[in-house]
Amino acid sequence: MLGSLEMPQSRKATPKAVIRPQEHSLQKIQKSINGRRSGVLGPCIEAYEAHIGDEGEPVRYLNNLTYPLLAARDATKSLIRAEMTNRWRDKPDRTETAIINSLKRSAGTNFQTMTAYALAKYLEETGSAWYIQHPVPKELKSALAIVFSGNVEIEGESTEDLVQEALEENADNKDAEAASVFVVQPDVDILIRNSEWSAANSGREPIILLSVKTSLADRAGMAARWKTYFDQATNPCPLSGTVGCSYDKLGIKMPNADKYHIYHVIVTANIYKLEGRDEKARRGELNSGQTRSNTYMFDLKLTTRDDPSADTPSDWHQFPYIIQFLETVSTRFGLPSRASTTLF
Protein backbone atom coordinates (compact mmCIF):
# COMPACT_ATOMS: atom_id res chain seq x y z
CA MET A 1 0.00 0.00 0.00
CA LEU A 2 1.40 3.27 -1.01
CA GLY A 3 1.85 5.83 1.71
CA SER A 4 0.12 9.07 1.32
CA LEU A 5 1.99 11.49 -0.81
CA GLU A 6 2.78 14.90 0.66
CA MET A 7 2.03 17.59 -1.80
CA PRO A 8 4.65 20.30 -1.90
CA GLN A 9 3.40 23.47 -0.31
CA SER A 10 3.70 26.60 -2.31
CA ARG A 11 5.83 29.26 -0.72
CA LYS A 12 4.41 32.66 -0.40
CA ALA A 13 6.62 35.22 -1.99
CA THR A 14 8.18 37.53 0.55
CA PRO A 15 7.07 41.03 -0.28
CA LYS A 16 9.94 43.17 -1.40
CA ALA A 17 10.64 46.01 0.99
CA VAL A 18 9.91 49.40 -0.43
CA ILE A 19 12.44 52.05 0.48
CA ARG A 20 11.03 55.45 1.36
CA PRO A 21 12.31 58.34 -0.77
CA GLN A 22 13.97 59.90 2.28
CA GLU A 23 16.00 56.74 2.95
CA HIS A 24 16.73 56.21 -0.73
CA SER A 25 18.12 59.74 -1.19
CA LEU A 26 20.37 59.36 1.86
CA GLN A 27 21.65 55.96 0.67
CA LYS A 28 22.36 57.38 -2.77
CA ILE A 29 24.35 60.29 -1.38
CA GLN A 30 26.24 58.04 1.04
CA LYS A 31 27.17 55.71 -1.82
CA SER A 32 28.46 58.65 -3.86
CA ILE A 33 30.44 59.95 -0.88
CA ASN A 34 31.98 56.57 -0.11
CA GLY A 35 33.20 56.32 -3.67
CA ARG A 36 34.98 59.67 -3.34
CA ARG A 37 36.35 59.59 0.20
CA SER A 38 39.89 58.95 -1.01
CA GLY A 39 39.76 62.08 -3.16
CA VAL A 40 39.36 65.78 -2.47
CA LEU A 41 35.89 65.28 -0.97
CA GLY A 42 37.25 63.10 1.83
CA PRO A 43 38.65 65.79 4.17
CA CYS A 44 35.42 67.80 3.97
CA ILE A 45 33.21 64.85 4.87
CA GLU A 46 35.56 63.78 7.66
CA ALA A 47 35.48 67.30 9.09
CA TYR A 48 31.68 67.37 8.81
CA GLU A 49 31.24 64.03 10.57
CA ALA A 50 33.56 65.16 13.37
CA HIS A 51 31.62 68.42 13.55
CA ILE A 52 28.21 66.77 14.09
CA GLY A 53 29.44 64.02 16.43
CA ASP A 54 27.52 60.88 17.35
CA GLU A 55 24.95 62.28 19.77
CA GLY A 56 22.56 65.20 19.96
CA GLU A 57 19.45 66.58 18.32
CA PRO A 58 19.11 66.09 14.54
CA VAL A 59 19.28 69.85 13.97
CA ARG A 60 23.03 69.55 14.58
CA TYR A 61 23.29 68.10 11.06
CA LEU A 62 22.42 71.53 9.67
CA ASN A 63 24.36 73.84 11.99
CA ASN A 64 27.28 75.97 10.76
CA LEU A 65 28.21 73.94 7.68
CA THR A 66 30.80 76.56 6.77
CA TYR A 67 32.98 75.39 9.66
CA PRO A 68 33.82 71.88 8.33
CA LEU A 69 34.31 73.30 4.84
CA LEU A 70 37.02 75.63 6.18
CA ALA A 71 38.43 73.05 8.59
CA ALA A 72 39.14 70.75 5.65
CA ARG A 73 40.89 73.37 3.56
CA ASP A 74 44.52 72.50 4.38
CA ALA A 75 44.03 68.74 3.96
CA THR A 76 42.15 69.30 0.71
CA LYS A 77 44.88 71.61 -0.57
CA SER A 78 47.55 69.01 0.23
CA LEU A 79 45.73 66.39 -1.86
CA ILE A 80 45.32 68.84 -4.73
CA ARG A 81 48.98 69.92 -4.53
CA ALA A 82 50.16 66.32 -4.80
CA GLU A 83 47.91 65.72 -7.80
CA MET A 84 48.84 68.94 -9.62
CA THR A 85 52.54 68.57 -8.93
CA ASN A 86 52.42 65.20 -10.63
CA ARG A 87 50.18 66.39 -13.47
CA TRP A 88 52.35 69.42 -14.28
CA ARG A 89 55.76 67.94 -13.52
CA ASP A 90 56.93 68.91 -17.02
CA LYS A 91 55.61 72.46 -16.61
CA PRO A 92 56.08 73.31 -12.91
CA ASP A 93 55.37 77.00 -13.49
CA ARG A 94 51.68 76.09 -13.99
CA THR A 95 51.37 74.16 -10.76
CA GLU A 96 50.36 76.98 -8.40
CA THR A 97 47.69 78.35 -10.73
CA ALA A 98 46.30 74.85 -11.21
CA ILE A 99 46.18 74.34 -7.44
CA ILE A 100 44.27 77.59 -6.89
CA ASN A 101 41.74 76.83 -9.63
CA SER A 102 41.23 73.23 -8.49
CA LEU A 103 40.80 74.32 -4.88
CA LYS A 104 38.03 76.72 -5.89
CA ARG A 105 36.23 74.07 -7.93
CA SER A 106 36.50 71.44 -5.24
CA ALA A 107 35.23 73.84 -2.57
CA GLY A 108 32.05 74.37 -4.58
CA THR A 109 31.32 70.71 -5.28
CA ASN A 110 32.33 69.64 -1.76
CA PHE A 111 30.02 72.24 -0.23
CA GLN A 112 27.10 71.12 -2.37
CA THR A 113 27.66 67.46 -1.50
CA MET A 114 28.02 68.18 2.21
CA THR A 115 24.87 70.33 2.24
CA ALA A 116 22.90 67.60 0.44
CA TYR A 117 24.25 65.00 2.87
CA ALA A 118 23.30 67.12 5.87
CA LEU A 119 19.76 67.71 4.60
CA ALA A 120 19.24 64.06 3.67
CA LYS A 121 20.38 62.94 7.13
CA TYR A 122 18.09 65.39 8.88
CA LEU A 123 15.00 64.63 6.79
CA GLU A 124 15.45 60.87 7.07
CA GLU A 125 16.13 60.79 10.81
CA THR A 126 13.23 63.08 11.70
CA GLY A 127 10.72 61.14 9.59
CA SER A 128 10.01 64.16 7.41
CA ALA A 129 7.67 63.91 4.44
CA TRP A 130 10.18 66.04 2.54
CA TYR A 131 13.11 64.46 0.71
CA ILE A 132 15.91 65.67 -1.51
CA GLN A 133 17.22 64.82 -4.93
CA HIS A 134 20.90 65.42 -5.59
CA PRO A 135 22.04 65.64 -8.28
CA VAL A 136 18.84 67.14 -9.62
CA PRO A 137 17.31 64.91 -12.35
CA LYS A 138 17.97 66.18 -15.86
CA GLU A 139 14.30 65.66 -16.70
CA LEU A 140 13.28 68.13 -14.00
CA LYS A 141 15.76 70.74 -15.19
CA SER A 142 14.42 70.36 -18.72
CA ALA A 143 10.84 70.62 -17.45
CA LEU A 144 11.72 73.94 -15.79
CA ALA A 145 13.37 75.42 -18.87
CA ILE A 146 12.33 78.92 -19.89
CA VAL A 147 12.06 79.77 -23.59
CA PHE A 148 12.83 83.00 -25.41
CA SER A 149 11.57 82.83 -28.99
CA GLY A 150 11.99 86.50 -29.89
CA ASN A 151 8.30 86.36 -30.81
CA VAL A 152 9.18 84.28 -33.88
CA GLU A 153 6.44 81.75 -34.60
CA ILE A 154 7.83 78.44 -35.83
CA GLU A 155 5.15 76.61 -37.72
CA GLY A 156 4.21 73.11 -36.68
CA GLU A 157 6.21 72.97 -33.43
CA SER A 158 5.02 73.34 -29.88
CA THR A 159 6.98 75.19 -27.21
CA GLU A 160 7.79 71.85 -25.56
CA ASP A 161 9.22 70.52 -28.85
CA LEU A 162 11.37 73.61 -29.27
CA VAL A 163 12.74 73.25 -25.75
CA GLN A 164 13.69 69.64 -26.40
CA GLU A 165 15.34 70.50 -29.70
CA ALA A 166 17.35 73.29 -28.11
CA LEU A 167 18.49 71.10 -25.23
CA GLU A 168 19.49 68.26 -27.55
CA GLU A 169 21.39 70.71 -29.75
CA ASN A 170 23.79 71.47 -26.91
CA ALA A 171 23.17 69.08 -24.03
CA ASP A 172 26.29 70.08 -22.11
CA ASN A 173 25.28 73.70 -21.63
CA LYS A 174 22.58 75.27 -19.51
CA ASP A 175 21.83 77.63 -22.37
CA ALA A 176 21.31 76.48 -25.93
CA GLU A 177 20.13 77.99 -29.18
CA ALA A 178 18.17 76.16 -31.83
CA ALA A 179 15.57 77.18 -34.39
CA SER A 180 15.67 80.82 -33.24
CA VAL A 181 14.91 79.75 -29.69
CA PHE A 182 17.00 80.52 -26.61
CA VAL A 183 16.48 78.21 -23.64
CA VAL A 184 17.56 78.80 -20.03
CA GLN A 185 17.53 75.98 -17.48
CA PRO A 186 17.54 76.62 -13.72
CA ASP A 187 20.83 76.76 -11.85
CA VAL A 188 19.78 74.34 -9.10
CA ASP A 189 21.94 72.01 -7.02
CA ILE A 190 19.45 70.37 -4.67
CA LEU A 191 15.75 69.67 -5.18
CA ILE A 192 13.33 69.17 -2.27
CA ARG A 193 9.94 67.46 -2.74
CA ASN A 194 7.19 66.16 -0.47
CA SER A 195 6.64 62.40 -0.71
CA GLU A 196 2.98 62.75 0.36
CA TRP A 197 2.10 64.82 -2.70
CA SER A 198 0.74 62.91 -5.69
CA ALA A 199 -0.50 63.80 -9.15
CA ALA A 200 -4.01 63.21 -7.82
CA ASN A 201 -3.65 66.31 -5.69
CA SER A 202 -5.32 69.34 -7.16
CA GLY A 203 -3.14 72.23 -8.19
CA ARG A 204 0.59 72.50 -8.72
CA GLU A 205 3.21 70.44 -6.93
CA PRO A 206 5.27 72.51 -4.47
CA ILE A 207 8.99 72.03 -5.08
CA ILE A 208 11.93 73.81 -3.54
CA LEU A 209 15.04 74.56 -5.56
CA LEU A 210 18.29 75.16 -3.70
CA SER A 211 21.15 76.95 -5.43
CA VAL A 212 24.13 76.20 -3.19
CA LYS A 213 27.22 78.44 -3.53
CA THR A 214 30.40 78.92 -1.53
CA SER A 215 30.20 82.62 -2.32
CA LEU A 216 27.86 84.91 -4.22
CA ALA A 217 30.06 87.47 -5.97
CA ASP A 218 31.03 85.17 -8.83
CA ARG A 219 28.46 82.39 -8.63
CA ALA A 220 24.99 83.74 -7.86
CA GLY A 221 24.41 85.34 -11.25
CA MET A 222 23.11 82.27 -13.09
CA ALA A 223 20.67 81.38 -10.33
CA ALA A 224 19.46 84.98 -10.05
CA ARG A 225 18.97 85.28 -13.81
CA TRP A 226 16.78 82.17 -14.02
CA LYS A 227 14.71 83.27 -11.00
CA THR A 228 14.12 86.65 -12.62
CA TYR A 229 13.08 85.00 -15.89
CA PHE A 230 10.86 82.60 -13.95
CA ASP A 231 9.05 85.48 -12.24
CA GLN A 232 8.44 87.05 -15.65
CA ALA A 233 7.31 83.83 -17.32
CA THR A 234 4.86 82.96 -14.53
CA ASN A 235 3.41 86.47 -14.24
CA PRO A 236 2.32 87.29 -17.81
CA CYS A 237 2.03 90.90 -18.81
CA PRO A 238 -1.61 92.10 -18.72
CA LEU A 239 -0.88 94.18 -21.82
CA SER A 240 0.27 91.19 -23.88
CA GLY A 241 -0.92 91.57 -27.44
CA THR A 242 -0.68 95.34 -27.46
CA VAL A 243 1.93 97.25 -29.44
CA GLY A 244 5.26 97.53 -27.64
CA CYS A 245 4.73 94.82 -25.02
CA SER A 246 8.22 93.72 -23.93
CA TYR A 247 6.96 90.23 -23.04
CA ASP A 248 5.79 89.75 -26.62
CA LYS A 249 9.10 91.04 -27.98
CA LEU A 250 11.02 88.52 -25.90
CA GLY A 251 8.58 85.71 -26.56
CA ILE A 252 9.24 84.45 -23.02
CA LYS A 253 7.39 81.26 -22.09
CA MET A 254 7.64 78.43 -19.59
CA PRO A 255 5.96 75.25 -20.88
CA ASN A 256 5.36 73.78 -17.41
CA ALA A 257 4.50 76.94 -15.52
CA ASP A 258 1.21 75.42 -14.33
CA LYS A 259 2.73 72.13 -13.18
CA TYR A 260 4.89 73.29 -10.27
CA HIS A 261 4.73 75.86 -7.52
CA ILE A 262 8.38 76.76 -7.20
CA TYR A 263 10.25 78.22 -4.25
CA HIS A 264 13.79 79.22 -5.16
CA VAL A 265 16.28 79.34 -2.28
CA ILE A 266 19.86 80.63 -2.32
CA VAL A 267 22.30 79.01 0.12
CA THR A 268 25.81 80.34 0.68
CA ALA A 269 28.83 79.45 2.79
CA ASN A 270 29.66 83.18 2.76
CA ILE A 271 33.43 82.75 2.49
CA TYR A 272 34.26 85.24 -0.26
CA LYS A 273 37.55 87.01 0.63
CA LEU A 274 37.45 85.39 4.06
CA GLU A 275 41.23 85.12 4.12
CA GLY A 276 41.86 88.65 2.86
CA ARG A 277 43.39 91.51 4.84
CA ASP A 278 40.30 93.71 4.69
CA GLU A 279 38.47 93.28 8.00
CA LYS A 280 35.15 94.36 6.48
CA ALA A 281 35.50 91.79 3.70
CA ARG A 282 36.24 89.05 6.23
CA ARG A 283 32.85 89.68 7.83
CA GLY A 284 31.27 88.32 4.66
CA GLU A 285 29.55 89.59 1.54
CA LEU A 286 25.90 89.47 2.62
CA ASN A 287 25.76 93.21 3.38
CA SER A 288 27.26 94.31 0.06
CA GLY A 289 25.28 96.15 -2.57
CA GLN A 290 26.24 93.55 -5.17
CA THR A 291 24.81 90.75 -3.02
CA ARG A 292 21.57 92.66 -2.45
CA SER A 293 21.12 93.23 -6.19
CA ASN A 294 21.91 89.57 -6.97
CA THR A 295 19.68 87.99 -4.32
CA TYR A 296 16.57 90.16 -3.79
CA MET A 297 14.50 87.94 -6.09
CA PHE A 298 14.91 84.69 -4.12
CA ASP A 299 12.08 83.36 -1.96
CA LEU A 300 14.47 82.53 0.88
CA LYS A 301 18.11 83.40 1.60
CA LEU A 302 20.15 81.11 3.84
CA THR A 303 23.72 81.23 5.14
CA THR A 304 25.62 78.30 6.59
CA ARG A 305 28.18 80.54 8.28
CA ASP A 306 27.35 80.97 11.95
CA ASP A 307 30.16 82.74 13.76
CA PRO A 308 30.35 86.07 15.65
CA SER A 309 32.61 87.67 13.05
CA ALA A 310 30.07 87.30 10.22
CA ASP A 311 27.55 89.98 9.31
CA THR A 312 24.11 88.48 8.75
CA PRO A 313 21.46 91.00 7.58
CA SER A 314 17.88 90.62 8.81
CA ASP A 315 16.65 89.26 5.47
CA TRP A 316 19.06 86.33 5.73
CA HIS A 317 18.56 83.28 7.94
CA GLN A 318 20.81 80.58 9.31
CA PHE A 319 20.54 77.33 7.38
CA PRO A 320 18.47 75.43 10.01
CA TYR A 321 15.65 77.91 9.30
CA ILE A 322 14.82 75.68 6.34
CA ILE A 323 13.07 73.40 8.85
CA GLN A 324 10.53 76.13 9.61
CA PHE A 325 10.25 76.98 5.93
CA LEU A 326 9.31 73.39 5.04
CA GLU A 327 6.66 73.43 7.77
CA THR A 328 5.21 76.62 6.29
CA VAL A 329 5.06 75.17 2.77
CA SER A 330 3.45 71.98 4.11
CA THR A 331 0.73 74.00 5.84
CA ARG A 332 0.11 76.18 2.80
CA PHE A 333 -0.49 73.17 0.54
CA GLY A 334 -2.27 70.99 3.09
CA LEU A 335 0.54 68.44 3.08
CA PRO A 336 1.89 66.59 6.12
CA SER A 337 5.33 67.61 7.29
CA ARG A 338 5.96 64.07 8.53
CA ALA A 339 5.85 61.02 6.32
CA SER A 340 3.09 58.46 6.77
CA THR A 341 4.03 55.01 8.06
CA THR A 342 2.61 53.39 4.92
CA LEU A 343 5.25 52.25 2.46
CA PHE A 344 4.93 53.73 -0.98
Image: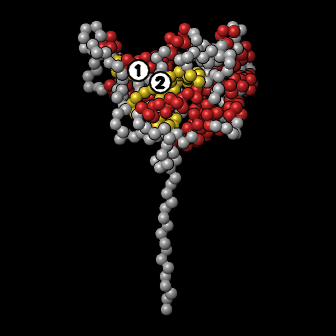
Label 1 amino acid? Answer: Phe
Residue 264 disc label:
2
Label 2 amino acid? Answer: His
**Residue occupied by mark 1:** 230
Q: Is residue 147 above or below residue 125?
A: above
Left or right: residue 344 versus residue 246 is: right
Label 1 or label 2, whichever comes before in sequence order: 1
Q: Residue 1: x percent and y percent? A: 49, 92
Q: Residue 115: x percent and y percent? A: 59, 30
Q: Badge 1 local density, few (<14 within 10 Å), some, or many (20+)?
A: many
Q: Secondary structure at mark 2?
A: strand
Q: Is residue 15 above or below residue 153?
A: below
Q: Residue at x 69, y 7 (%)?
A: 278
Q: Residue at x 36, y 39 (%)?
A: 201
Res 104 → quadrant:
top right
Q: Is residue 294 above or below residue 70?
A: above
Look at the image and tell me whether residue 71 can be seen.
yes
Q: Residue at x 57, y 10 (%)?
A: 288
Q: Are marks 1 and 2 in contact (CB under 8 Å)?
A: yes
Q: Residue 11: x percent and y percent? A: 49, 67
Res 61 → quadrant:
top right
